[in-house]
């Protein structure tokens, strides 16, 4: 079984699309979003800093910034671009970026210009309210319900997003998907995702896979390159990150919804993975 078997269940949800032009130079630092972004530069230049990598923005190129990727932008005067904000979801809790190795920049195909124009034509009311992330990433705007004019537009939108996202895929990850199916790993991952607010024991997961605890732990790590406990913690952190960015829920409620045992433990683990305390994370990115 190849990755395309799982990729059929990926749900793409469009958040924003528009064509925008900058009349003055703009610089935005420390930007992070719970959604992925694709840019098509049509005129002008700029740059994106991701970690220590500087990526030059130039015409006729596509750019991908995965969700929860800290970055800084510089848009030169008269830069014109299409932007797409979207989310990807898998019912079994896998991160789409764990299925594929992706690149950040790729040359634009002729059809890509048409795809952006068509996507904008069938989704004309999804422009961001402001260029500044501090404004358009307010919680009320990020939680705005999405809607389509009809089923045909929804299907076409998903199809276009799939095509554009495919441009950035270099190769599949080296996961043994036959083994995933054999040991019911997709079912296990879906169970984890839907029970993050509860205490999840390795014994329970092993029973669902019809394996002993030790055998299950070995199989899980051999397939996903991470132990069951580590995977669960990462999923809890991802959920906490999302809630910190998109809601005004108190930390206590986020701890409960993410399945952590205490504030002390949550703060320590959260800082280990993000280098920030939960409150620092919300102040900086939220």
Image (spheres, grey):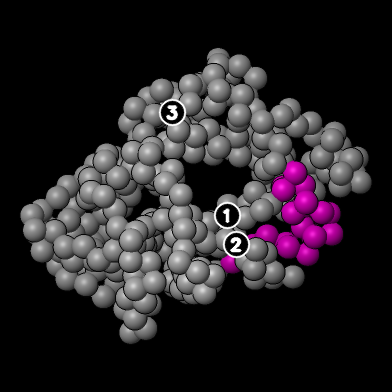
- What span is colored magenta in the figure? 172-191
Name the secondary structure under disc 1: strand
Q: Position of residue 257 (x, y in %)?
A: 61, 29
Labels 1 & 2 near each other (Cβ < 8 A): yes
Give the left or right position of residue 95, taking residue 49 as reference.
right
- The residue drawn where x is 48% and y is 21% is 250
- Can you identify the residue that label 2 sits on? 10
Left or right: 124 as drawn, with respect to 223: left
Name, please, the residue furthest toward the bottom. 110
Q: Residues within 10 Å of mark 2 (few under 14, many from 20)?
A: some
Task: Check disc 3 and report its element: helix, strand or loop.
Answer: loop
Q: Answer few, some or many: residues within 10 Å of disc 3's Cα (few below 14, many 20 plus, some between 14 and 19).
A: some
The answer to whether residue 227 is seen in the rendering is no
Compared with residue 106, is residue 179 higher up or lower down, i.e. above or below? above
- The Cα atoms of the two marked residues, 1 and 3, are separated by 23 Å
Closer to the eye: label 1 or 3: 3
Q: Is residue 15 above or below residue 283?
A: below
| Residue 70: percent from left, percent from top | 36, 43
Which residue is at a point 14% across and 50% down the rendered structure image? 26
The quarter holding residue 277 reads top left
Where does the image place residue 179, in percent across and percent down from the top left?
79, 60
What residue is shown with label 3? 248
16 and 282: which one is in front? 16
User: 221 and 251: which one is in front?
Assistant: 251
> Where 116 falls versus 14 (above or below)?
below
The quadrant of the image that shows the N terminus is bottom right
- Quadrant including the C terminus: top left
Residue that badge 1 annotates:
89
Instruction: Give the spatial CA distance, label 3 vs label 2.
Output: 28 Å
């Amino acid at each position: 079984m190849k990755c395309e078997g799982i990729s059929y269940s990926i749900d793409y949800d469009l958040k924003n699309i528009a064509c925008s032009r900058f009349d003055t130079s703009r610089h935005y630092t420390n930007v992070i979003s719970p959604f992925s972004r694709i840019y098509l530069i049509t005129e002008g230049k700029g740059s994106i800093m991701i970690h220590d990598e500087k990526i030059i923005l130039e015409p006729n190129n596509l750019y991908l910034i995965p969700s929860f990727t800290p970055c800084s932008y510089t848009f030169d005067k008269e830069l014109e671009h299409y932007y797409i904000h979207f989310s990807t979801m898998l019912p079994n809790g896998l991160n789409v970026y764990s299925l594929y190795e992706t690149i950040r920049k790729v040359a634009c195909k002729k059809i890509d210009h048409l795809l952006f124009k068509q996507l904008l034509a069938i989704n004309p009311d999804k422009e961001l309210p402001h260029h500044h992330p501090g404004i358009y990433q307010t919680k009320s705007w990020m939680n705005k319900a999405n809607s389509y004019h009809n089923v045909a537009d929804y299907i076409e939108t998903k199809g276009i997003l799939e095509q554009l996202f495919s441009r950035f895929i270099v190769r599949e990850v080296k996961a043994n998907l036959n083994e995933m199916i054999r040991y019911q790993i997709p079912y296990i991952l879906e169970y984890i995702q839907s029970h993050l607010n509860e205490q999840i024991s390795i014994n329970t997961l092993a029973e669902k896979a019809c394996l002993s605890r030790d055998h299950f732990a070995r199989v899980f790590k051999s397939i996903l390159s991470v132990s069951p406990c580590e995977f669960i913690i990462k999923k809890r952190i991802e959920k906490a990150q999302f809630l910190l960015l998109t809601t005004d829920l108190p930390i206590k409620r986020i701890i409960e919804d993410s399945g952590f045992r205490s504030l002390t433990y949550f703060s320590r683990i959260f800082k280990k993975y993000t280098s920030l305390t939960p409150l620092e994370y919300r102040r900086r990115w939220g």
